[in-house]
Amino acid sequence: MDDMYAVGILIIVCMLVIFIGRMKKFGDFVVSFLIRAALGLISIYFCNEACAYFHMERIMVGINFLSGLTCGILGFPGVALLYGIMALKFL
């Protein structure tokens, strides 16, 4: 019976170690997601300014939650995707 408790405690400790390792990777993911989203939204802002300067208001991308989510997941290719969608919508 004592062996069962020892095995149970060993399993719980192993699961705790795995959980802590996963949380560290999750934290790294969250930080990189937020950095990609922030840089993507900043690049959208400057691209919108360039579009306004060159009188291409029809392909300007809105800065909102969905564009931030797209930039956070895909990074700079997400910015290009958003502008590509707007350009196709313009055609």
Image (cartoon, grey):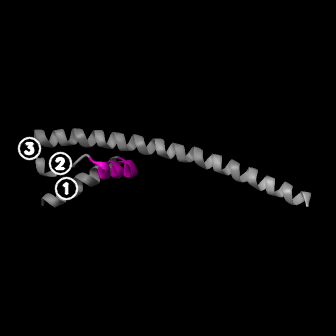
- Specify whether 73 is left or right of 67: right
Q: Which residues are magenta?
A: 64-75
- Specify whether 3 is left or right of 16: right
User: Which residue occupies the foreground of this view, 25 or 77?
Assistant: 25
The number of discs equals 3
Relative image position of residue 85 (x, y in whole percent):
22, 58
Q: Are marks 1 and 3 in contact (CB under 8 Å)?
A: no
Mark 1 / mark 3, whichever is N-terminal: 3
Relative image position of residue 5 (x, y in whole percent):
85, 56
Label 1: how many residues lie within 10 Å, few (<14), some (14-19) or many (20+)?
some
Q: Secondary structure at mark 1?
A: helix
Mark 3: amino acid: His
Residue carrying label 1: 86
Q: Residue 66 lies in magenta, yes or no?
A: yes
Please tell me which residue is depicted at 91% across the width and 61% down the height of the picture. 1
Mark 3 / mark 2, whichever is N-terminal: 3
Please tell me which residue is depicted at 64% across the width and 46% down the height of the picture. 20
Mark 1: amino acid: Met
